[in-house]
Amino acid sequence: METLKAIGLFVQNEILGMKWLDRLVAAMLEGFGMDLDTWYAASIRFFIYDVIKILILLSFLIFIISYIQSYFPPERTKRILGRFKGIGANILAALLGTVTPFCSCSSIPLFIGFTSAGLPVGVTFSFLISSPLVDLGSLVLLTSIFGFKVAITYVIVGLVLAVIGGTIIEKTGMDKYVEQFVKNANSVQIEDQEMKIKDRLKYAYEQLAATVKKVAPYILVGVLIGALIHNVIPEIWVQTVLGSNNPFSPVLAAVIGIPMYADIFGTIPIAEALFAKGVGIGTILSFMMGVTALSLPSLIMLKKAVKTKLLVVFTVIVSVGIILIGFLFNALQGLFI
């Protein structure tokens, strides 16, 4: 048992967490004569280490995920979802969202395409919630920082939120609040092309290049904010605003996160810094989910496809779910740390 635990810690710390890279960066900075106990050297160390680590993991993960995704083009996904009814369809839509590594804005066109193809609006909303919120990459990256328990928990609660949110929207008859042009849009039927392995590898590489180019600015900004939180902002300030002494910290974290626009990869370095400052797991999850599932740009885009009532219902359901998840996991934090 101890051997398995040691292997697990090695994988988490040295392979996924790349602690060897942190030591290498520290040695490099010391070689340049920097005092690592100063805030600016510590910030530089955090920035270089996190940027390289996230980009390495991201490149590997996006390549693998994109290769898998090559088996699930939009038309095939529509056909798969169309075979299921009820909550089973919501569950499948949420699960399919995990193999489509899109940010919230990128998920809107697929939402419109699925809805115009005649899929129930609740099913398409389960996909819309899950796709930016949960993916295989987030599982690995979260494991590298917070450990396996927190990573699995994040993925599970994200899927549950997607299923519940879509089911509520379906059961309350919200489909009548989808704009008519979406319902009447012609769904273009594209025949699936049988791709060879070299074609899938090429597709995966192209998706990798496009994704890294798209998310790199958010990663850089996220790591910069994380470095400042980690090494510049006094811990007492963070604890006062988002610490356990503030019972409404999950609410505040969600409110702070919603106006931001980033995907899961941009939020992780900020979450890592907050965690180091003693912020509760639930509060961190509320922040990450607020950023990824309810960014203002995605809500503005979604407003073009749905009427105000449905947009409000969607926002309220997801916001309440995010906040409740935050309170729950703050209360159960001892199980994860």
Image (tube, helix red, strand yellow):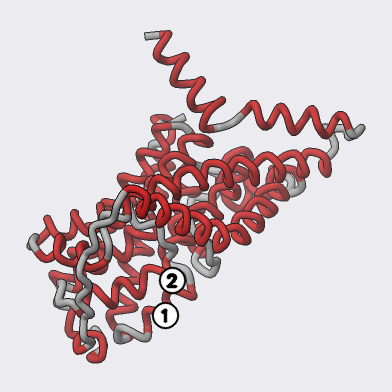
How far across and how far down the image is residue 86, in percent? 9, 62
Residue drawn at the location 38% of the way across and 52% of the way down: 66
- Residue 331: give x, y in percent of width and height: 40, 40
| Residue contact between numbered discs 1 and 2, judged by CB atoms under 8 Å | yes
Helix, strand or loop status at disc 2: helix
Q: In this view, does 248 lie to the left or right of 318?
A: right
Q: How many angstroms separate mark 1 from mark 2 (CA)?
A: 7 Å
42 vs 142, left or right, is: right
Q: How crowded is mark 2: few (under 14 residues within 10 Å), some or many (20 or more)?
A: many
- For residue 229, above or below residue 313: above
Q: Front-most of 281 and 302?
A: 302
Q: Which of marks 1 and 2 is nearer the N terminus?
A: 2
Residue at horizontal 53 percent and vertical 69 percent from the top: 259
The residue type indicated by label 1 comes to Met
Q: Mark 1 points at which residue?
A: 301
Q: Give the residue drawn at x 67%, y 54%.
A: 225
Q: Disc 2 marks which amino acid?
A: Cys
Q: In which quarter of the image is residue 328?
A: top left
Is residue 252 something one can see in this rendering?
no
Residue that badge 2 annotates? 105
Residue 162 shows up from this direction: yes
Depth check: give the residue in front, 74 or 255.
74
Q: Which of 255 and 308 is in front in this view?
A: 308
Q: How crowded is mark 1: few (under 14 residues within 10 Å), some or many (20 or more)?
A: some
Residue at the extreme top of the image, as rendered: 2
